[in-house]
Amino acid sequence: MKTRPAGIGNVNADWMGLLPSKLSAMPLKHLAVPGSHDSFTYWVDVQAPVGPDQKVYVKYLATMFSVLAKKVMVKWSMTQNLTFMEQLDAGIRYFDLRVSSKPGEPGNEIYFIHGLFGHKVRDGLLEINSFLSKHKKEVVFLDFNHYYAMEAEHHVYLLGMLQEVFGSKLCNNCAVESITLDYLWDKKYQVIVFYHHPSGQGNPFMWPGNKIPAPWANTTEPNKLIQFLETTLKERAKQGSFHVSQAILTPRVNTVAKGLVWGLRNYLVERNLPTIMSWVAAQRPGVDGVNIITSDFVELTDFANIVIKLNNLLLSEQDRKAR
């Protein structure tokens, strides 16, 4: 029988609320926070048309081979195996979100997308809200960074939905340096939404994308990825933003061809995880350090545990200063 790896289950469901007061008083941009990449791809709809985010040759393939091609795409689209609730229980607090309408479908419904259409956005948001209502000291970052096939009315619909679902839990856009867990707990804010589209401008609850840079290495090679993560951390802005280190490898077309049978998980991720995880485990949060770290297949290791425990380094640092 396959056992669930360490760090999964609800052991980290309240990790923010359990942080020592020294850490809850620090700017959140200096804490280590685990995140997931393409967070909503744990379920994709094989019957739905290919998503508008796909290149022309993939659309051609899908038309030609239909269900077979889609099954191949499912292997490469599924970067997360845990549902939302399971990711939250495991300690994931940053979600990378890509959304789309279904071209040709009446109404303004919006779906999560990575290659194939996934769940309705509303269902995912309700799941997050349900978790937050039970865990009052936990805070999530929702990073809406890619939009496909969306007109002005779709954005109006999505922005309205975010306010309707989260209501007073939404943190208004303000100085990043002022955001500590103590501040958020005092105001009862639990959701920080980043909206990388002009439609969000002027809405006090939508944070601009430039406050959460997430440089992307776009490589299949772990050594290049680590070099890129190191360089971009050194260049991290001193003021005005959070920071996402994307500890992820990206499949190329020839990688997809070689790995058709195995899919992303076996071909690219598992063989390189030890290298990536040893980099993560060697990081420090704090000034000039890591903040949000994202990974593919967050259940393959006790990824969230490793990231959360990095915050202990801030305590020993403070103790040293106090001596």
Image: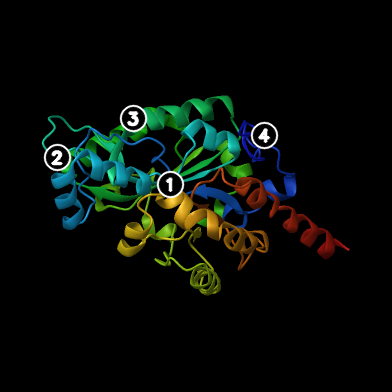
| x then y, percent, for residue 104 | 10, 36
For discs 1 and 3, the disc positioned in front in the rendered view: 1
Pick whichever of labels 1 and 3 is earlier in the sequence: 1
Three-letter code, disc 1? Thr
Q: CA distance from mark 2 to mark 1?
A: 24 Å
Q: Which residue is mark 3?
A: 122
For discs 2 and 3, the disc positioned in front in the rendered view: 2
Q: Which mark is residue 103?
A: 2
Asked whether the residues under the numbered discs 2 and 4 touch, taking CB atoms below 8 Å apart as contact, a structural biologist would say: no
Q: CA distance from mark 1 to mark 3?
A: 21 Å
Q: Residue at x 53, y 25 (%)?
A: 133
Asked whether the residues under the numbered discs 2 and 3 touch, taking CB atoms below 8 Å apart as contact, a structural biologist would say: no
Asked whether the residues under the numbered discs 3 and 4 touch, taking CB atoms below 8 Å apart as contact, a structural biologist would say: no
Pick whichever of labels 2 and 4 is earlier in the sequence: 4
Three-letter code, disc 3? Arg
Q: Which mark is residue 11?
A: 4
Identify which residue, 86 or 132, lies in the foreground: 86
| x then y, percent, for residue 260 | 35, 52
Pick whichever of labels 2 and 3 is earlier in the sequence: 2
For discs 2 and 1, the disc positioned in front in the rendered view: 1
Q: Which residue is mark 1?
A: 79
Q: Is residue 281 left or right of residue 219?
A: right
Pick whichever of labels 3 and 4 is earlier in the sequence: 4
| x then y, percent, for residue 43 | 38, 35
| x then y, percent, for residue 234 | 55, 74
Q: CA distance from mark 1 to mark 4?
A: 22 Å
Identify which residue, 137 or 270, lies in the foreground: 270
Q: Residue at x 39, y 60 (%)?
A: 210
Pick whichever of labels 1 and 4 is earlier in the sequence: 4
